[in-house]
Image (cartoon, rainbow, N blue to C red):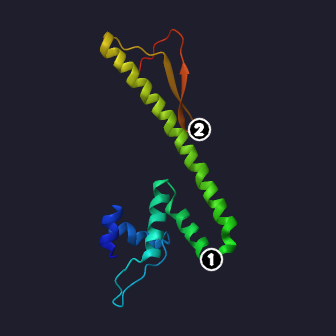
Amino acid sequence: MTIKEVCDKYHIAPDTLRYYERVGAIPSVTRTGKGIRNYMEQDISWVENAICMRGAGVPVERIAEYVALCRQGDGTFPARRDLLKEVRVGLLAQIETCRRELERLEYKIERYESAVETGKLTWDRNFSFNLETGSFECRTDTGSEEKTS
């Protein structure tokens, strides 16, 4: 496959593919006799891996580290497993942050839907930013109204 075909298939820019190759997030791509990239099946597998890991929020440097470990052979199974476990921890933290942010948005939507019906906007919860977790946390306020929207 040409770089254009790969980019069209995976909806990524040619510069992105070249960058992934340059930094080691995908191994060097097979080339024709004239030096033109010719993505073979194994190259496509690496591209799909990079796209998947980037989609999960994995930094390109960690992807390159994973690729380097894979290319070193089976003796790196424990290191690869550990790297993926670290990635999983980070991804689960991101999911939890998104869940809390979604909770806040759902609450606000609920309150605005009620305001559309009643003509009055009221709040019975307070969301405050927790510096330790880096996310908003919800607290129910009995009898008080939040002044911010």
Q: Give the position of the C terminus as an image quadrant.
A: top left
Answer with the quarter of the image where residue 123 lies. top left
* Amino acid at the residue labelled 1: Gln
Q: What numbered label is drawn on residue 133?
A: 2
First in residue order: circle 2 vs circle 1: 1
Q: CA distance from mark 2 to mark 1?
A: 37 Å
Kindly tell me whether residue 13 is visible in this rendering: no
Give the structural element (helix, strand or loop) at label 1: helix
Comparing 5 with 87, the one in front is 5
The percent coordinates of residue 47 (x first, y second) are 44, 68
Q: What residue lies at 55% left-to-right and 49% top-to-bottom?
A: 91
* Residue found 44% across the figure and 75% down from its top: 41
Badge 2, how many Cα within 10 Å: few under 14, some, many 20+? few
Residue type (three-letter) at the residue carrying disc 2: Thr
At mark 2, the secondary structure is loop
Q: Residue 17 falls in which quadrant of the image? A: bottom left
- Give the class, few, some or many, for how many residues have Cα within 10 Å of label 1's Cα (few <14, many ≥20): few
Identify whether 96 is placed above or below 4.
above
Between 45 and 145, the one nearer to me in the picture:
45
Check the image and name the residue furthest to the bottom.
33
**In the rendered image, which residue does mark 1 sit on?**
72
Q: Is residue 58 left or right of residue 118?
A: right
Q: In percent of the image, x 33 and y 61: which residue is there?
A: 11
Residue 147 position in % (x across, y down): 42, 17
In percent of the image, x 41 and y 70: which residue is there? 19
* Mark 2 or 1, closer to the camera: 1
Label placed on residue 139: none
Quadrant location of the N terminus in the rendered image? bottom left
- Label 2 close to label 1 by CB (< 8 Å): no
